[in-house]
Amino acid sequence: MPQTVTTASTTTTAATDYLETRRHELRKMRMLMVDGNLTTNLRSTEGGVNG
């Protein structure tokens, strides 16, 4: 939200800094089959915040 500053006979508008943070999540799944048999079943989840 802009702020208005009045001094003597001048009026200026100062914009405030805007910062938006976002949370993210990355999901991975790996399945490996050999000769029709499931040999590997891995799941991982990574997450964080950026902004």
Image: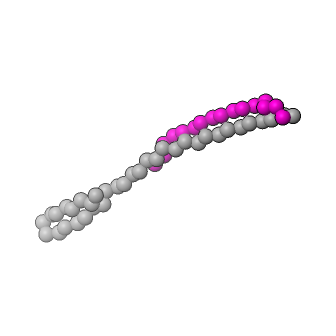
Q: Is residue 37 magenta?
A: yes
Using the image, determine if residue 35 lies above or below residue 10. Answer: above
The reply, left or right, for residue 34 in relation to residue 21 is: right
Above or below residue 8? Residue 20 is: above
- Residue closest to the eye, 29 or 46: 29
Q: Quadrant of residue 11?
A: bottom left
Dominant SS type (magenta): strand
- Residue 6: x, y in percent? 16, 63
> Residue 32: image x %, image y %?
78, 36
- Residue drawn at x 28%, y 58% as measured from the top left: 1
Residue at 30% from the left image edge and 60% from the top image edge: 15
Q: Residue furthest front?
A: 36
**In the rendered view, how is the structure colored?**
one colour
Q: Position of residue 34 (x, y in %)?
A: 84, 34
**What span is colored magenta in the figure?**
36-51
Q: Looking at the image, which residue is at 74% across and 36% down?
A: 31
Instruction: Tell me where residue 38 sits by quadrant.
Output: top right
Q: Residue furthest bottom?
A: 9
- Residue 39 lies left or right of residue 20; in this view the side is right
Which residue lies most toward the right here?
Answer: 35
Question: In the visual, does 21 lie left or right of 1?
Answer: right
The structure residue drawn at horizontal position 46% and vertical position 47%, both measured from the top left corner, is: 22
Q: Position of residue 41 (x, y in %)?
A: 72, 32
- Image position of 40 (left or right of 19): right
